[in-house]
């Protein structure tokens, strides 16, 4: 059984491999790394799901550089994203200061909400992410593209802590004003619809018969009685005609008139 | 009276209604399951794989509920039907989704929406055809109708998921519509393309509930027993064969097998059955 299962999985994997090869990874945006000044620093951007007051898709950036990097004290983080919904597009620029010393070894997650949860399944994201130094010059720039799954709801490999999103960003993006998740309401709607469809609709599509069992039995008896009468009539029709009464002087048999040749 | 005089207008067979409802519930169930997914990164490496898992979950849950409802309507064993629904629906949707993943993603938003609609359409179409195989489809025309209904329903679901506005609401709506389309396509054409459909009527003053519906398509070579009477399809004609004690056909006694020329009610013992001819034979 295990061998059969292994063969099945191998066959499915081989069949689906070409399709999967062109698909983007599940969570990370495609980032084309270029030279990052200072050259000893590395940066990584990821799209993550942030759990704050409401869900949202966020960008996390992790920047790592040696503590002795020249100019590190002046680094400030900023992210610029071009949000491109299905209809129209909107420029979204975020800029948040962080203390460079705080992130001098491995930065904490910097999360900037770019898409609200309610529109994650529909919206594609195309843009760039840039890190700028204290003077505003880009020290790192990378194109980012992301599209949601075709069938599923987007999932992300990383969950950002709610505290990772600065309060200023909440206020700037008016995240707190977004409506809460509608899932409980949708589940309730589905439940009520299911009860109506399963419990009540069949009653009206296929109404009850008003004939009782006694009515049916009476109908059956009447039908059988009718059948009996019909059959009797049919039997009477197929019976031979009834003979008429004979008189004493009537010949009882025609054979008498014929002579008996044996005599 | 001509043979077609007694044909009812094409009404929805109970099994088609059951497939529609069970499919919608299956779609909603798949949405509820997938809503609980938070972090599948250890198991799923890409959104394409996630789409495959989602489509498999959707069609498997739809298939399980639809074939279970169908088996209940036919008074057959439920567990084998449920297992077959899980397997057939899952495999059909997986094939459809994988084929759709070969389509280009598209650089523009409109192309992406179009590819998404095609993906939903293929998933529903293939899952419906796979599920309909459980009814042993014999006619190509019925198979094509199953595929058409599935493709159209899936396209509507995909378009719903791409609608502007709250995608959080459109996603469960799309799952439910897709499930309903798969369910209707899987069992509907088989019913309304059959020569006749026999529905057991409820007892006096008892209403039909979803669980009490008892219906069966009378296909060529198949028969349904109504107490001791038999309704079968003899060649291309529907035959009612009464037992020795006779039966009642539309209020008239029936002692010999007759070919039905119109819709009729058959009473045998305490069971009443409505036979609907869906095609003028």
Image (cartoon, rainbow, N blue to C red):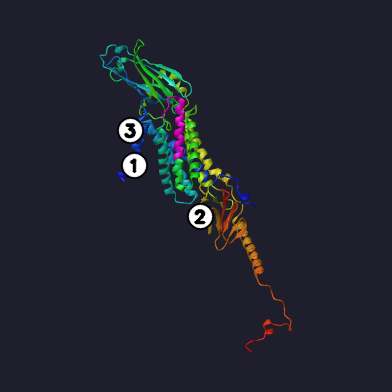
- The residue identified by callout 3 is B42
Front-lying residue, B142 or A97: B142
Do labels 3 and 2 touch, CB within 8 Å?
no
Residues at marks 1 and 2, CA–CA distance in whole angstroms: 38 Å
Mark 2 lies on residue: B223
Q: Which mark is residue A8?
A: 1
| Of callouts 3 and 2, the N-terminal one | 3
Residue B18 in view of the camera: no
How far apart marks 3 and 2 lie (CA) works out to 52 Å
In magenta stretch: residue B113: yes
The location of residue B38, given as percent across then percent down, is 38, 32
Cα distance in 3D space between marks 3 and 1: 21 Å
Q: Quadrant of residue A117?
A: top left
Horizontal side, residue A80 vs residue A238: left or right: left
> Which residue sits furthest bottom?
A263
Residue under the image location 44 percent in, 43 percent down: B130
Report the span colored magenta.
B104-126
Q: Chain of mark 1?
A: A
Residue B104: give x, y in percent of width and height. 41, 29
Mark 3 packing: few (<14 Cα in 10 Å), some, or many (20+)?
few
Discs 3, 1: same chain = no
Report in which chain the residue with disc 2 lies. B
Q: Give the residue displayed 35% in from the left and 33% down from the top.
A: A18
Mark 1, secondary structure of its residue? helix
Give the chain of mark 3: B
Residue reaching furthest to the top = A135
Using the rendered image, report if marks 3 and 2 lie on a common chain.
yes
- Is residue A19 located in the magenta-colored stretch of the structure? no
Which mark identifies residue B118?
none
Image position, residue B196 (x, y; %): 55, 50
């Amino acid at each position: 059984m295990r061998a059969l299962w292994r063969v099945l999985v191998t066959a499915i994997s081989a069949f689906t491999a070409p399709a999967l090869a062109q698909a983007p990874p599940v969570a990370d945006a495609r980032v084309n790394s270029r030279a990052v000044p200072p050259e000893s620093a590395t940066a990584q951007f990821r799209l993550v799901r942030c759990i704050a007051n409401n869900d949202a898709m966020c960008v996390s950036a992790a920047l790592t550089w040696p503590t002795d990097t020249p100019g590190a004290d002046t680094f400030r983080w900023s992210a610029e994203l071009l949000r491109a919904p299905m209809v129209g597009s909107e420029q979204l620029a975020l800029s948040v200061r962080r203390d460079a010393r705080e992130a001098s070894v491995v930065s904490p997650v910097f999360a900037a909400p770019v898409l609200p949860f309610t529109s994650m399944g529909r919206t594609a994201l195309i843009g760039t992410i840039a890190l700028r130094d204290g003077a505003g010059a880009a020290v790192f720039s990378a194109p980012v593209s992301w599209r949601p799954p075709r069938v599923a709801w987007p999932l992300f490999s990383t969950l950002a802590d709610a505290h990772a999103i600065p309060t200023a960003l909440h206020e700037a993006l008016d995240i707190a004003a977004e409506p809460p998740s509608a899932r409980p309401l949708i589940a309730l709607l589905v439940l009520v619809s299911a009860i109506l469809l399963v419990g009540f609709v069949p009653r009206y599509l296929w109404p009850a018969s008003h004939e009782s069992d006694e009515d049916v039995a009476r109908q059956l008896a009447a039908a059988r009685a009718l059948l009996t009468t019909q059959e009797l009539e049919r039997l009477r029709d197929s019976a031979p005609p009834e003979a008429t009464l004979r008189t004493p002087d009537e010949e009882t048999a025609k054979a008498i008139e014929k002579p008996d040749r044996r005599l | 009276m001509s043979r077609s005089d007694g044909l009812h207008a094409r009404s929805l067979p109970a099994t088609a209604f059951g497939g529609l409802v069970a499919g919608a519930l299956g779609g909603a169930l798949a949405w509820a399951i997938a809503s609980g997914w938070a972090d599948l990164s250890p198991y799923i490496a890409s959104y394409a794989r996630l789409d495959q898992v989602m489509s498999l979950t959707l069609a498997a849950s739809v298939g399980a509920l639809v074939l279970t409802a169908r088996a209940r309507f036919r008074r057959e064993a439920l567990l084998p039907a449920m297992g077959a629904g899980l397997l057939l629906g899952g495999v059909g949707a997986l094939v459809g989704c994988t084929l759709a993943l070969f389509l280009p993603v598209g650089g523009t938003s409109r192309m992406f929406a179009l590819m998404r609609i095609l993906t939903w359409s293929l998933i529903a179409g293939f899952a419906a055809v796979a599920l309909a195989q459980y009814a042993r489809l014999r006619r190509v025309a019925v198979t094509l109708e199953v595929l058409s209904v599935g493709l159209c329903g899936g396209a509507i679901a995909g378009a719903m998921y791409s609608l502007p506005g709250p995608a959080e609401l459109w996603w469960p709506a799309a799952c439910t519509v897709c499930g309903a389309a798969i369910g209707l396509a899987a069992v509907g054409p088989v019913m309304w393309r059959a020569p006749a459909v026999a529905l057991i009527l409820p007892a006096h003053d008892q209403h039909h509930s979803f669980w009490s519906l008892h219906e069966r398509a009378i296909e060529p070579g198949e028969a349904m027993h109504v107490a001791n009477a038999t309704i079968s399809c003899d060649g291309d004609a529907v035959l009612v064969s009464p037992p020795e004690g006779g039966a009642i056909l539309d209020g008239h006694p029936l002692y010999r097998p007759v070919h039905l020329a119109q819709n009729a009610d058959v009473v045998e013992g305490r069971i009443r059955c409505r036979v609907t001819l869906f095609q003028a034979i």
